Image (cartoon, rainbow, N blue to C red):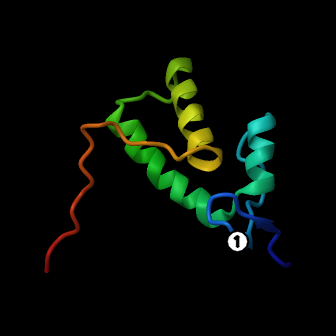
């Protein structure tokens, strides 16, 4: 079976899309229609940083609202920004 292709809003090219909507609602459908699997994987990594740096508990409504805002910015806005104090990890030296 061929992959479902989408014009990815994040990576600005035609790529395989998600197999199903990531969650119910308009935003879930918008992501399904416009976000590639590659961009979704990028979001998953970015989300880890957001959860850790903002010390979010995804089980709470307040944290879910913050995550949704960052998700909308990441895909459809100017990009989700890290907290000002965030220092990206440095790759290990060999």
Q: Residue 84, image x and y in percent?
A: 29, 37
Work out whether 84 lies above or below 10.
above
Kindly identify the residue that appears in the image at 84 percent across and 78 percent down: 2
Kindly identify the residue that appears in the image at 69 percent across and 58 percent down: 9
Q: Is residue 36 visible?
A: yes
Kindly identify the residue that appears in the image at 41 percent across and 37 percent down: 51
Q: Is residue 24 visible?
A: no
From the viewer's perspective, tell me whether residue 79 is left or right of residue 57.
right
- Residue 91, quarter of the rendered image: bottom left
Q: Residue 82, image x and y in percent?
A: 37, 42
Query: Which residue does the numbered mark 1 point to in the structure image?
Result: 13
For the N terminus, the quadrant is bottom right
Work out whether 46 lies above or below 39.
above
For the C terminus, the quadrant is bottom left
In front of the other: 79 or 19: 79
Work out whether 43 lies above or below 84.
below
In front of the other: 39 or 10: 10
Q: Residue 66, image x and y in percent?
A: 52, 28
Residue at the left extreme of this rendering: 94
Q: What SS does tag 1 mark?
A: loop
In front of the other: 76 or 90: 76
């Amino acid at each position: 079976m061929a992959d479902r292709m989408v014009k990815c809003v994040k990576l600005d090219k035609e790529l395989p899309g998600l197999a199903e909507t990531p969650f119910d609602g308009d935003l879930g459908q918008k992501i399904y229609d416009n976000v590639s699997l590659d961009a979704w994987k990028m979001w998953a990594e970015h989300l880890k940083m957001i959860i850790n740096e903002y010390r979010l508990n995804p089980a709470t409504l307040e944290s879910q609202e913050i995550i949704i805002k960052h998700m909308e910015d990441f895909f459809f806005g100017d990009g989700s920004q890290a907290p000002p104090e965030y220092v990206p990890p440095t790759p290990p030296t060999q």
